Image (tube, helix red, strand yellow):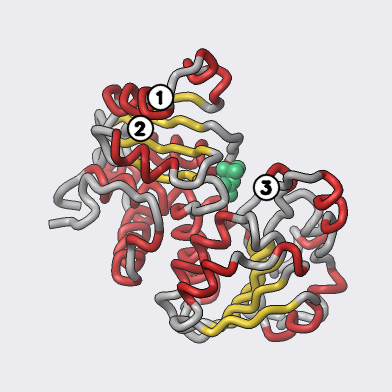
């Protein structure tokens, strides 16, 4: 039986490399399927979503994915338009949405929110971002993008630059990559280094090195994954001001990189990739966002269909 059927996706740590590869194979099948066949895969099924934090790509790509499978979506794009504004608990909101839908997609500012939601929901829950903890479907689409754009994952040098302390996409990506044979180069200001409890759990499974200066390692990268400094996670505006603009990838940085290296970014970006990079052959972040729709469609298909 399909092992994803009716299962929640809370952490990418719950999926080993084999499961990741199964999602990627399903994604390839869905991308090449005639649209009229794809529209039969989740016909009559409903995706419910609850977003307590802003989103463009995650929410809309889930909606687009469900629509491409013949299903529909309902939910709240922000807590202010839901009964959370009147004091309703997360548990009651999730229980209610799960009664109206077949799968629940949740984004919430607290670590542990998706795990808790999966416990109270009558339907599978997909974590669409929980605090600074994880964003597992982002990692699925990130690793899929690397496979498609570089032809493989094993053996690559992958740089991750920016806010490694608060970036939940970074943690899910690292957990996902830990099943592959990769060299990871972590680049951040000292105050935004990866949280120590993470490094302890994964160091033994992949090679990681730490830098403060991007120029020091840029020439080694096959993939440079750039992240935004997450202003909203700083308790102190002065601390944010100290690190704001620490890294800006512009044409000068590209000249120091391998000609076939690619630049990725989970988006949204603020100022960490200069707009003139967009038209270079290195830029892959908009393709990455587009792959997200296909990867999420594959995941929905796997969760909702026993025989997928
Ligand atoms: N990458 C990502 O999660 O984007 P959104 O915040 O726009 O959903």
- In three-dimensional space, the C-alpha distance between marks 2 and 3, rounded to whole angstroms, equals 24 Å
User: What residue is shown at x 55% (from left), y 39% (from top)?
Assistant: 109
Q: 260 or 90, which is in the foreground?
A: 90
Disc 3 beta carbon < 8 A from ligand 1?
A: yes
Label 3 sits on residue: 268
User: What residue is shown at x 58% (from left), y 78% (from top)?
Assistant: 184
Q: Is residue 229 above or below residue 71?
A: below
Mark 2 residue element: strand
Q: Is residue 139 above or below residue 254?
A: above
Q: Is residue 266 above or below residue 149?
A: above
Which mark, by number, is residue 74? 1
Q: Residues within 10 Å of mark 3 (few under 14, many from 20)?
A: few
In this rendering, position of residue 306 left or right of residue 267: left
Expressed as whole percent of the image width and height from the top left, the position of residue 171 reads 53, 62
Q: 60 or 172, which is in the foreground?
A: 172
Label 2 sits on residue: 47
Expressed as whole percent of the image width and height from the top left, the position of residue 60 reads 51, 37
Mark 1 residue element: strand
Q: Does any portion of residue 262 appear in the rendered image?
A: no
Q: Quadrant of residue 98?
A: top left
Disc 1 beta carbon < 8 A from ligand 1?
A: no
Q: Quadrant of ligand 1?
A: top right
Asked if the residue at tag 3 contacts the one at tag 1, i.e. Cβ–Cβ closer than 8 Å, the answer is no
Q: Quadrant of residue 251?
A: bottom right
Asked if the residue at tag 3 contacts the one at tag 2, i.e. Cβ–Cβ closer than 8 Å, the answer is no
- In three-dimensional space, the C-alpha distance between marks 1 and 3, rounded to whole angstroms, equals 24 Å
In this rendering, position of residue 58 left or right of residue 187: left
- In three-dimensional space, the C-alpha distance between marks 2 and 1, rounded to whole angstroms, equals 6 Å
């Amino acid at each position: 039986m399909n092992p994803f059927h009716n299962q929640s996706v809370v952490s990418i740590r719950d999926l080993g490399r084999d499961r990741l590869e199964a999602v990627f194979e399903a994604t390839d099948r869905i991308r090449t399927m005639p649209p009229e066949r794809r529209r039969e895969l989740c016909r009559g099924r409903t995706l419910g979503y609850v977003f307590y934090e802003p989103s463009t790509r995650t929410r809309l790509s889930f909606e687009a994915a469900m629509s491409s499978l013949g299903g529909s979506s309902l939910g709240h794009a922000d807590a202010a338009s839901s009964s959370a504004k009147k004091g309703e608990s997360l548990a009651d909101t999730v229980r209610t949405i799960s009664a109206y839908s077949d799968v629940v997609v949740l984004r919430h500012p607290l670590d542990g929110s998706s795990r808790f939601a999966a416990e109270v929901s009558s339907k599978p829950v997909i974590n669409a971002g929980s605090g600074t903890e994880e964003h597992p479907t982002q990692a699925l689409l990130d690793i899929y993008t690397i496979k498609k754009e570089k032809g493989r994952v094993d053996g690559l040098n992958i740089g991750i630059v920016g806010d490694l302390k608060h970036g939940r996409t970074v943690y899910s990506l690292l957990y996902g990559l830990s099943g592959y044979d990769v060299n990871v180069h972590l680049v951040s200001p000292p105050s935004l280094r990866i949280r120590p409890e993470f490094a302890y759990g994964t160091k033994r499974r992949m090679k990681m090195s730490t830098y403060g200066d991007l120029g020091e390692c840029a020439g080694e990268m096959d993939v440079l994954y750039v992240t935004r400094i997450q202003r909203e996670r700083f308790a102190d505006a002065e601390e944010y001001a100290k690190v704001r603009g620490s890294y800006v990838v512009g044409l000068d940085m590209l000249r120091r990189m391998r000609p076939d290296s690619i630049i990725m970014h989970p988006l949204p970006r603020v100022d960490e990739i200069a707009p003139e990079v967009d038209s270079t052959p290195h830029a892959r972040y908009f393709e990455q966002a587009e792959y997200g729709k296909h990867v999420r469609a594959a995941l929905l298909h796997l969760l909702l269909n026993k025989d997928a």
